[in-house]
Structure formats: structure tokens, C-alpha cells
Image (cartoon, grey):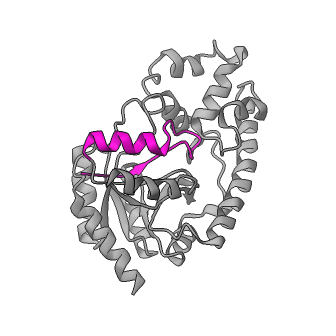
Amino acid sequence: MIDLHIHTIASSDGQHTPHEIFTMAQHAGLKAIAFADHNSIGSVKEGIALAKAFNIEFIPCLELNTFYLDHDLHILAYFIDYHSEELRKWLEEIHAEKTIQSMKRIEKLNELGFVFSIDDVKKFSGERIPTGISFLKAIVSRKENRSDERIVRFTDGDRSHSPYVNFYRDYLRGGKPAFVPLKAVETVSVMKRIQSWGGIPVLAHPSDTGDAIILDLIKEGLPGLEVFSSYHSHQEEEHLLALAKENNLLATAGSDFHGSTIKPDVTLGGIRGNSYELLEKLKGAHAHLQK
């Protein structure tokens, strides 16, 4: 059993430390895991050290929020060279651009009538890049918003079962009212950068991406799909697996675990099809690149 998509506190919406994740992975009987923090390799070195202590295989990774034709796509970067100075500088550039993006998102949300500021957001994100959880917590923290029916949906209504994810999906992702694209993370250029640093880009939880876009990305060199995900139905997984086989793509499995307070419907290792064989093929592809 494997789980190749896990978030730690290096993500602003991650609940658990690397040590806590490894302890949970051991209890779940996982043989291999990967930290895939948002635009961050902050927990990778600790993960490598903990892998030896827990005898659990660890794969360096990060998750990059990219955009393609106004679609918000997440790209996983497996085996990326986390020692690269160029990668570090690039992540700093992304952090700077995403800080600007956060301000523009606040402006858009303010225009929609939500009363809050960047200072409210930083109370929950700290110095990390804000995500859906930071924005929703900031909005709810202001009494001016608490009786707003649009917010009540997330605190005590039909979107309250997973409020932070749902807020992101309803307001911040591609095509939604507060979506702000970033030039620094255009999907195709991100894939090429990942490959230039020895990594393997994989499209995360692609069930709602659409086959047309997936096929476009395959033409641009996308080598893998996260077929098995907590977001996918069995039918969607079968379709994505067939698509991967038809196009000679790697298939991966990841829960996108953040912690029960962030994503209560997602459990560590709680995915179908999370066979170690998938990791063997991923490692084989990486070894081939190193030749």
C-alpha cells in the first residue's frame, strides 16, 4: 500500500507534522509515502530522515498550483531535485507572485461583499501562501460576514461537510469569481521545469479536468495521471486508468490527505488501487531519465 499525495504543515492547509504523518502511515500499514506540499519542499528533508527511522519508503515531491486556459490544474512533481538552487529561487518567485495573487483575490472577494483584509488572512496563513482554508477562516473571523447566507453554507449548511475545500472550489479555482491566474505557473512551462530538474510531472486528481485538456497536456509531454484519488469514483478511476494505458502514461495513487480538520472525508492511505506496483513503475521511469 502506498500514498503518494500527502500534505504536511509545510502547506498552509496541512494539519500534521512530518513525524505525525509517518506515525499514521506506519499504523495504516503503508509501505511508501510522498509529501506533496503546495509549492513547497519544506518537509522533504525531514521526510527523508524519518523514512529511515520508520522503515517506510519516501519519495520527494511537491504540488504546484498551475493554470491552463483558465483552468486551475495541480501538478505533482515526483523525484524533483530538492537540492536545486534554481528550484529554490523559482519557488521564491512563485511565493512572491502568489502573495500578489492573494491580494487580488481579497480585492475580488471584497467586491463580492465579503469584509476582511490581508491582516485577517495572515492570522491563519502566517508567512505561508494562503489557501482556501486561510481565506474562509479570515472571512468567518469577521462578524460582518457571519450572517451572510453565502458563508453560512460553509459553516452550517450544505457545503459545511468539507468547508475549506468547498470554498476553494466555489470561489478561488479556475472559472470562479475570485480566480486569479499566475503567469509563473502556466501548466506546460511548469511540466518542462519539473523535468529539467529531474522530476516527473503528474496531473493531480484529474477527474474534473476533462479528456480534451488531458490529451492536450499529453501532447505537451505530460507523463502521468493520478488515477487513484479520494476525489474519484470507481467509474472515474476506471476511465482514467484506461486513458493512461491508451496513452502509455504512468498511473499514481494519492489520497490528498491534509488532516481531519481540513478534509474530514479524506483518510491517509484511504484510496483504491494503491498498489506498490504503481510506485515501481514510477521509479523505473525516473531511473530511465537518469541514464
Q: Residue at x 41, y 83 (%)?
A: 290
Percent across and percent down for residue 188 are: 53, 69
Q: Which residues are magenta?
A: 1-29
Horizontal placement of 33 versus 165: left or right?
Answer: left
Which residue appears at 71% of the width and 14% of the height?
A: 143
Residue at 66%, 44% (x, y): give it.
Answer: 128
Q: At x 64% / y 21%, what residue is drawn? A: 140
> Residue 5 magenta-drawn?
yes
Q: Return the residue nearer the eye: 260 or 51.
A: 51
Write down the quadrant of residue 183 in the picture.
bottom right
Q: In the displayed orientation, state which residue is furthest to the front.
A: 53
3, above or below 132, in the image: below
Instruction: Kindly indicate the quadrant of the structure image that contains residue 249.
Output: bottom left
Name above or below for residue 136 compared with residue 27: above
Where is 149 relative to 100, above or below?
above
Question: In this view of the protein, which residue sits in the foreground, 148 or 135?
Answer: 135
Q: Nearer the viewer, residue 164 or 187?
A: 164
Quarter holding the C terminus is bottom left
Q: x%, y% of residue 208?
A: 40, 49
